[in-house]
Image: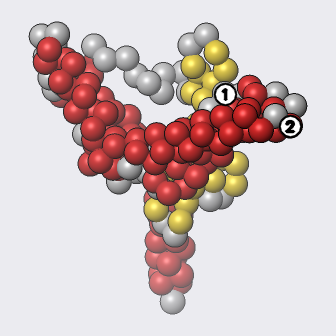
């Protein structure tokens, strides 16, 4: 009887370890997909509806802030803000899809071919910059994991990875204010 209890506890610990290592595996898969320009692999790691909704809200907020507090009083400015929000939302909708990500990567591949740059290969990882270099990782809760990525000169970008069941996916990209 003791053997079964020990076995059950060991299996539970292994399962918990697997689930808790999920965000690190997701980040590694994102890193590899970007380095290898593999849009399908990247798409499997992203919850597109959640990322689209978050980015649209952030862009609309940024447009409203840039317009100023009195912008809604002027009907032409309000119309301009509405048009800018519509265009920005359409751009986010178009880019934050599996085919949009694939199109961006294909565009980069075409750019590389036009400039006689070699296609990515397994040995190429050292020549490409790691987009997540210097990133800070931490759990915000048992089902939420944050990755803070330094953004050169500006504020860092935060990637939020959320757990649904035992699967972890990128659900939010928080742009600098």
Mark 2 vs mark 1: which is more N-terminal?
A: 2
Residue at image coords 57%, 27%: 149
**Residue bearing the label numbered 1:** 176
Instruction: Say whether marks 2 and 1 touch (CB < 8 Å).
Output: no
* Outermost residue, bottom side: 1
Residue at image coords 60%, 40%: 83
Residue 94 x/y as whole percent: 40, 45
Is residue 95 shown left or right of residue 63?
A: left
Numbered mark located on residue 99 in the image: none
Residue at image coords 60%, 36%: 84
For the residues carrying marks 2 and 1, which lies nearer the camera in this image? 2
Residue at image coords 82%, 28%: 68
Numbered mark located on residue 73 in the image: 2
- Residue in the foreground of this view, choosing between 87 and 65: 87
Asked if one can make out residue 161 in the rendered structure from this viewpoint, the answer is no
Q: Compared to 66, does 174 lie above or below?
A: below
């Amino acid at each position: 009887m003791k053997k079964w209890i020990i076995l059950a506890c060991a299996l539970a610990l292994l399962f918990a370890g697997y689930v808790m290592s999920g965000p690190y595996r997701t980040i590694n898969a994102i890193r590899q997909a970007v380095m290898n320009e593999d849009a399908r692999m990247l798409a499997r790691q992203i919850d597109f509806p959640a990322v689209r909704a978050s980015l649209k809200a952030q862009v609309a907020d940024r447009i409203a802030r840039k317009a100023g507090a009195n912008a809604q009083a002027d009907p032409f400015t309000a119309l301009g803000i509405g048009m800018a929000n519509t265009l920005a939302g359409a751009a986010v909708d178009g880019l934050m899809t599996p085919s949009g990500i694939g199109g961006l990567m294909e565009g980069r591949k075409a750019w590389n071919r036009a400039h006689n740059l070699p296609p990515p290969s397994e040995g190429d990882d050292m020549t490409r910059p790691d987009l997540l270099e210097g990133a800070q990782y931490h759990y915000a809760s048992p089902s939420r994991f944050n990755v803070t990525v330094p953004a050169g000169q500006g504020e860092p970008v935060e990637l939020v990875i959320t757990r649904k069941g035992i699967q972890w996916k990128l659900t939010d990209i928080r742009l600098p204010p």
